[in-house]
């Protein structure tokens, strides 16, 4: 390990100071340099109270003459000098150091960070940062000269404090002032600066991570040069600016993007360190397991599939599901599993984050068209981010539906779910807030519901390569009771509404094959998010008439076939033994589906429960949940554990030995003991929360056999409508104050006991209110 005493620093031990071996702390030092976006123009007032607090495990030495931090200070926002600012520190702005430190310390909580920051807005490589000759100070640019002096002063100060340190990496973000320089010249100058800095700090292989400037349409040359430097060799890394947003005319990142920029720097540092694989620098990760020991994870999410739609859950099912039944025989079938919400968008948010959606702004809405922004905040830890951070390849193919941001030609966000919004989209601009901004390396799919939306077009990465060109002509599509939920939106010429699931299957299979061919030792997380079996029921041509249960039965049969094909692909690639397969649905079956399938084919997709999609009765959210992990999960087993799809994140975290931070997966419990059949029959969850169609106004809570609907009615559907009226159950007990059910004695939720057991209702209501106030249902975590 390099115990650095750089430049012309003396190695003498000052009188009265302890020797090197007795120093109190050891710091990992990071050098932050560049111009305005490294100095930072994010507004401190846009941060949360928690983000504004000083960091106990990070310090900063800031020098932007004539302003300095006056020595080492606890890291907090405000070490930045915006234009025309004449006052002292802390200032009202901040840079990427806040997000960077947070991400680095989350990965390695036992580390102490020391950030030396010497950035200044409006500076260029040609003159300001010119390294010149090492022995000729006058040949050096003023910023480079000041930065070297800043490093000397800062490290001298650490030594005087009695601390040791290791210089880990240079973080560089600059280029806006060099936009007119040709690519080759800018690349040469940046490489010269990095080489000289390594010489001056006496760390020959010092990693350097360079950040890309914002693309305002006029910086192609300098952006190309930065990318060339950052992707050239084992000692450099590159930070993309894709998806970042600015508060001004395309130059300075806003607060959210400054935080994200810092996290991307942290990710890039991790990757560079992995590339170097030297004994001098530890991996920026607390994970003890090697990649080969980590299992792959394949999660298959069906849409609007009911508990009773599968033969392994419903012996009276009229639809053959041989592949899903086989999956249940090969693994574990959960009989008390629940979608976090009774509709898709909130459930998908909760699966990705381990947090109930009602806890975040707009967490009860369902997006359409160009609706957004994403429910997932830029700094929120997600399941794919968590796995990507420990070396997984991550991919999502299919329906997204958690919100994203399209832009119009003026660069303004649209955030409008109307049909008119589609005509405003500038398809040449990147989409922000989608899967690639939430932890996935690859994405191909749709913004919202694939075959019932105002936008019928595929997103590939962050753009729609084939935009819509005309309105949908429904006369060319099948006409039957299950085809009515099909909006007359705008359709792309390559978008076949009857073959969407075949397209998603093709993409998932191709990903698996390419992954094994290129990176066979890297674990992967694949989310296959099906269109099936959301209305309209448009089974592909190969599946029409394959069952005796009409088009919707054929659609379920197609979904089952897709699952079988994915299992075959795992077998063919020798991936099955080390892949955890999970299968579930985002909520219960749809109203027209239940009505017509019961009436026409004697098939009950909600069997044996009351309620359907949108309802807080069991039929709206009790869903199939199958888990297969050969050699780990007992074959042909059943678990009665009460669980939610929010639990997937904590479960996978425990499997991969990730220590979740306290501000992530707030409603997630690890089901690993249940999956391994090691729970001893004891409940893992003390209770579970459910969210109905109306978000925070339609919450329910379940504890053991008791379930409280803390709202009037079903929490979703109006049972006066013709299709549901026959399923309404009159009651002598008013539900003005909610409904209380004993699921052991009354699994069909036919008798409201709120007047007979008021003390139980009050206890459940009190627990619900406490969970709302605490912002979580899982216990607070102490980070390892």
Image (tube, rainbow, N blue to C red):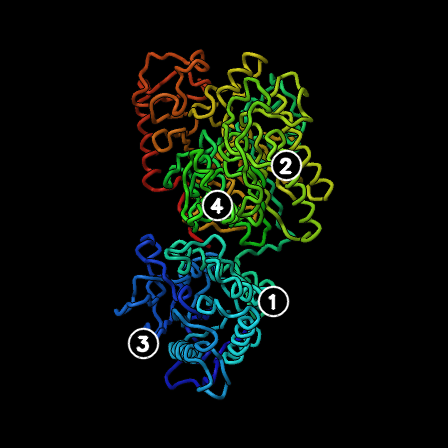
Q: Is residue 739 above or below residue 359?
A: above
Quick one: 354 or 597, which is closer to the camera? 597
**Looking at the image, which residue is at 49% across and 60% down?**
266
Q: Which mark is residue 232?
A: 1
Q: CA distance from mark 4 to mark 1?
A: 33 Å
- Does dot 2 land on a helix, a strand or a loop? helix
Q: Earlier in the sequence, mark 3 or mark 2?
A: 3
Q: Earlier in the sequence, mark 2 or mark 4?
A: 4
**Looking at the image, which residue is at 44% across and 32% down?**
341
Q: CA distance from mark 3 to mark 2?
A: 60 Å
**Looking at the image, which residue is at 46% across and 19% down?**
610
| Location of mark 4 (residue) | 426
Q: Is residue 162 visible?
A: no
| Location of mark 3 (residue) | 66
Quick one: 643 or 365, which is closer to the camera? 365
- Does dot 3 land on a helix, a strand or a loop? loop
Tags 3 and 2 in contact by the CB under 8 Å rule?
no
Dot 2 crowding, Cα within 10 Å, few <14, some 14–19, many 20+: some
| Location of mark 2 (residue) | 503
Q: Which residue is at the far front? A: 470
- Of circles 3 and 4, which is in front? 4
Instruction: Report x, y in % for residue 465.
Output: 57, 45
């Amino acid at each position: 390990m390099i115990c650095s005493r750089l430049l012309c620093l003396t190695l003498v031990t000052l009188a009265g100071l302890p020797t090197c071996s007795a120093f109190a702390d050891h710091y990992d030092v990071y050098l932050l340099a560049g111009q305005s976006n490294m100095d930072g123009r994010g507004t401190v007032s846009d941060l949360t109270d928690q983000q504004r607090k000083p960091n106990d495990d990070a310090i900063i030495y800031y020098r932007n003459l004539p302003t300095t931090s006056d020595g080492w200070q606890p890291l907090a926002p405000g070490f930045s000098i915006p234009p025309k600012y004449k006052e002292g520190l802390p200032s009202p702005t901040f840079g990427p150091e806040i997000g960077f430190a947070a991400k680095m310390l989350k990965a390695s909580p036992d580390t102490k960070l020391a950030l030396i920051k010497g950035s200044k807005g409006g500076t260029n490589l040609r003159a300001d940062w010119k390294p010149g000759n090492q022995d000729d100070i006058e040949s050096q640019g003023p910023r480079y000269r000041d930065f070297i002096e800043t490093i000397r002063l800062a490290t001298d100060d650490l030594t005087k404090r009695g601390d040791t340190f290791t210089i880990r990496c240079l973080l560089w973000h600059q280029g806006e002032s060099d936009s007119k320089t040709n690519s080759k010249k800018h690349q040469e100058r940046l490489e010269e600066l990095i080489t000289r800095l390594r010489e001056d700090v006496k760390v020959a292989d010092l990693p350097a991570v360079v950040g890309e400037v914002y693309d305002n349409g006029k910086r192609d040359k300098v952006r190309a040069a930065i990318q060339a430097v950052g992707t050239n060799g084992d000692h450099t890394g590159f930070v993309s600016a894709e998806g970042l947003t600015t508060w001004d005319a395309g130059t300075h990142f806003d607060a959210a993007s400054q935080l994200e920029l810092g996290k991307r720097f942290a990710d890039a540092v991790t990757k560079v360190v992995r590339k170097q694989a030297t004994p001098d620098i530890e991996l920026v990760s607390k994970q003890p397991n090697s990649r080969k020991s980590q299992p792959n994870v394949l999660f298959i999410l069906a849409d609007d599939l009911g508990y009773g739609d599968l033969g392994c859950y419903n012996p009276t099912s009229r639809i053959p599901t041989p592949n899903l039944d086989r999956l249940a025989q090969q693994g574990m079938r959960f009989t008390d599993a629940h979608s976090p919400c009774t509709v898709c968008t909130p459930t998908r948010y909760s699966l990705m984050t381990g947090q109930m959606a009602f806890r975040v702004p707009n967490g009860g809405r369902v997006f359409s068209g160009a609706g957004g922004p994403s429910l997932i905040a830029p700094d929120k830890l997600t399941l794919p981010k968590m796995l990507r951070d420990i070396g997984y390849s991550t991919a999502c193919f299919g329906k997204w539906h958690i919100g994203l941001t399209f832009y119009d030609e003026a660069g303004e966000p649209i955030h409008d779910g109307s049909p008119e919004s589609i005509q405003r989209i500038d398809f040449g601009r990147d989409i922000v807030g989608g899967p690639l901004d939430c932890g996935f390396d690859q994405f191909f799919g749709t913004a919202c519901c694939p075959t019932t939306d105002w936008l019928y077009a595929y997103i590939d990465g962050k753009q729609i390569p084939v935009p819509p060109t005309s309105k949908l002509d429904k006369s060319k599509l099948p006409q039957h009771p299950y085809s009515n939920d099909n909006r007359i939106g705008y359709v792309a010429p390559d978008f076949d509404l009857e073959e969407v699931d075949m397209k998603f299957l093709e993409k998932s299979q191709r990903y698996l094959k390419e992954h094994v061919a290129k990176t066979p030792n890297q674990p992967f997380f694949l989310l296959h998010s099906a269109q099936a079996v959301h209305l309209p029921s448009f089974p592909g041509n190969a599946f029409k008439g394959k069952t005796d249960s009409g088009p919707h039965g054929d659609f379920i049969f197609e979904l089952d076939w897709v699952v079988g094909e994915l299992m075959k692909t795992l077998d063919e690639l020798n991936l099955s033994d080390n892949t955890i397969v999970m299968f579930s649905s985002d909520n219960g079956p749809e109203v027209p589906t239940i009505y017509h399938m019961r009436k026409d084919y004697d098939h009950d997709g909600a069997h044996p429960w009351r309620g359907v999609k949108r309802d807080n009765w069991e039929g709206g959210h009790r869903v199939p949940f199958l888990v297969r992990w050969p050699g780990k999960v007992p074959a042909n087993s059943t678990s009665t554990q009460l669980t939610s799809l929010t639990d997937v994140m904590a479960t996978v975290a425990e499997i991969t030995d990730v220590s979740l931070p306290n501000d992530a997966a707030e409603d997630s419990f690890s089901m690993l003991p249940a999956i391994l059949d090691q729970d001893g029959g004891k409940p893992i969850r003390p209770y579970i929360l459910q969210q109905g169609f109306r978000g925070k106004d339609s919450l329910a809570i379940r504890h053991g056999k008791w379930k409280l609907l803390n709202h009037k009615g079903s929490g979703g559907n109006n049972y006066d409508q013709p299709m549901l009226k026959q399923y309404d159950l009159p009651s002598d007990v008013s539900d003005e104050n909610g409904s209380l059910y004993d699921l052991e004695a009354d699994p069909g939720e036919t008798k409201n006991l709120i007047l007979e057991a008021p003390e139980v209702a009050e206890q459940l209501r009190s627990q619900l209110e406490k969970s709302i106030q605490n912002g979580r249902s899982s216990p607070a975590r102490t980070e390892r």
